[in-house]
Image (tube, grey):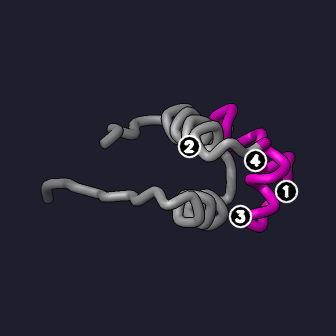
Amino acid sequence: MSRIETSSDIGKLVCSKRKELGLTQKEAAGLCGVGVRFWSELERGKSSLHLGKVLLVLTRLGLEIQVEGRV
C-alpha cells in the first residue's frame, strides 16, 4: 500500500502501474478513455487535473483509494 500525499505521488503510482502492465502512455490512455495529454500530465503530477478522470484511471488500472481520517 502506498501513502498518497501529493499529486506527484499519484503520478508516480500511475506510471509504475502502467509500466508494470507493459503499456505505453498512448495505450494506457486509450484503455482508460482519456487523452494522451491528460495521461502525460497525470504521470507528471499536475495538480489541477479533473478529479473524476483521475479516479476513473485509478479504477481502470485496478488501483483503489482508501481514505482514512479522524473527525
User: Where does label 1 land, which residue?
Assistant: 35
Judged left or right of residue 32, residue 47 is: left
Image location of residue 60, percent across then percent down: 59, 65
Contact between marks 4 and 1 (CB within 8 A): the answer is yes
SS under mark 1: loop
* Callout 1 amino acid: Gly
Q: Main secondary structure of the magenta part?
A: helix
N-term-proximal mark, 3 vs 2: 2
What's drawn in magenta, residue-wise? Answer: 24-45
Q: Quadrant of the C terminus?
A: bottom left
N-term-proximal mark, 2 vs 4: 2
Image location of residue 32, percent across then percent down: 71, 64
Contact between marks 3 and 4 (CB within 8 A): the answer is yes
What count of labels does the image hold?
Answer: 4
* Callout 2 amino acid: Lys
SS under mark 3: helix
C-alpha gap between disc 4 and disc 1? 6 Å
N-term-proximal mark, 1 vs 2: 2
User: Where does label 2 land, which residue?
Assistant: 17
C-alpha gap between disc 3 and disc 2? 13 Å
Q: Quadrant of the N terminus?
A: top left
User: Where does label 3 land, which residue?
Assistant: 32
User: Where does label 4 land, which residue?
Assistant: 39
C-alpha gap between disc 2 and disc 4? 13 Å
